[in-house]
Image: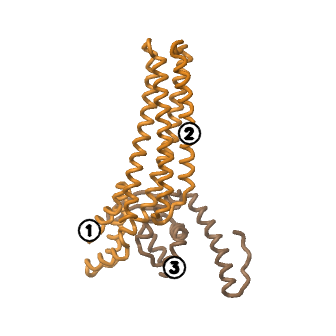
Chain colours: A brown, B orange
Amino acid sequence: MEGEMLKGHLDMIVLAALAPGPAHGYAVIEEIRRKSGRAFDLPEGTIYPALHRLEQAGLLSSRWVTAESGRRRRVYALTRQGGRALAERRAVWRQFSDAVGGLLDGVRPSRRPA
Amino acid sequence: MITQYLAELAAALSFDRRLARRVAREVEDHLRETVAEYAPGDRAEAERRAIANFGDPRVLAMQFASLSLARRTRRAGIAVVLAVIAVLMAMKVRVAWYAAAEWRIGEDARQLAGTVLAIDRYAFWGAIIVGLIALFYAGYIRVPAVLQAKYCRQNRRVIFLCAAAACSLVVSVVSDGVLTALHLSGELREAAIIPLVSMAAEIACAGAVILLIIDTLRGRMRTEALLRA
């Protein structure tokens, strides 16, 4: 998938990857790859500025933990505000996706509240 | 290879040392885990692939730079407003103390005190208004994913506003110092400890804000150097 197209939705993708529970950067990337059927394959480093940006915006929280390997790693989790933001973005995305799908397929989109 | 990559990343992030330390630790954990996933096999090749997949350190630094700049300018705006509030509280404590102790300025210094008081008020209100404008403007600016010249210009405006508010606050504190000196002139008794301590607190607040703004300016210059590199 086009990198530029992905970057526009990176925040939503990262929030969605953290919806199942707290995870560190590597696990977030793995979750994105797994859930997207490897369609989203961004340069791995791109995730970290996004994680920091979302944390600065109050949508994520983070803390250092010690992994089984003994390495210290930063684990990120959705905050309540982050959960709300994800729900809002999900609703907007579905509405947009339905509308574009309707246009492309010539089918009238189903009306859903945003 | 990973150590060299981390050193390059830390050098690219040198505009914000705290951020550089945190990012280097996170990235090291990430790269080591990636290399472990590639195993067994050629370790050097696994490290090379992990680094290639991670991306160019300079590109990453440009993405972190806008976040660092946003955090620094917001911190400066908040610090200015908090310093103004602290100075106001110190001022109120001193004025209440003068009233309780029935401590008045002598007749001969009343005219000078009136002029200084007027300067104090204008400077103080100037600091509040400009400080709040800086804080709201800093909150209004949208942080881009990658550092951009336009964003740097907007941040420069916020720091300029913070500096203007801090200068106004310094004028207010100096005026307070003159008024305190006029109150205390002639009779330095034990009760003078409250005005002196409150003045020391005002000077400390104004000094801390000035130092923070200087630090923010230096950080901004180091961050903007990325655009020129």
Q: Nearer the viewer, mark 1 or mark 3?
A: 1
Question: Which chain contains the residue that carries disc 2?
Answer: B
Q: Nearer the viewer, mark 2 or mark 3?
A: 2
x, y percent for residue B56: 36, 72
Query: Which residue carries the number 1 mark?
Result: B4
Instruction: Please tell me whether mark 2 sits on a helix, a strand or a loop.
Output: helix
Q: On screen, B10 above or below B89?
A: below
Task: Give the position of the N terminus of chain B as an image quadrant.
Answer: bottom left
Q: On screen, B212 above or below B29?
A: above
**Do residues under tags 1 and 2 come within 8 Å of each other at their CB atoms?**
no
Front residue of this view, candidates B99 and A99 = B99
Q: CA distance from mark 1 to mark 2?
A: 48 Å
| Few, some or many residues within 10 Å of mark 2 (<14, 14–19, 20+) | many
Instruction: Please tell me whether mark 1 sits on a helix, a strand or a loop.
Output: helix
Instruction: Please tell me whether mark 3 sits on a helix, a strand or a loop.
Output: loop
Query: Which residue carries the number 2 mark?
Result: B128
x, y percent for residue A12: 55, 69
> What residue appears at the point 53 percent right and 39 percent down from the top-left corner?
B127
Question: Which chain contains the residue that carries disc 1?
Answer: B
Q: CA distance from mark 1 to mark 3?
A: 32 Å
The amino acid beneath tag 3 is: Ser
Q: On screen, B129 above or below A55?
A: above
**Do residues under tags 1 and 3 come within 8 Å of each other at their CB atoms?**
no
x, y percent for residue B59: 39, 69
Which residue is most to the bottom? A105
Q: Which mark is residue A36?
A: 3
In this picture, residue A111 sits left or right of residue B30:
right
Front residue of this view, candidates A48 and B46 = A48
Q: CA distance from mark 2 to mark 3?
A: 50 Å
The amino acid beneath tag 2 is: Ile
Q: On screen, B54 above or below A79?
A: below
> What residue appears at the point 44 percent right and 25 percent down from the top-left corner?
B197
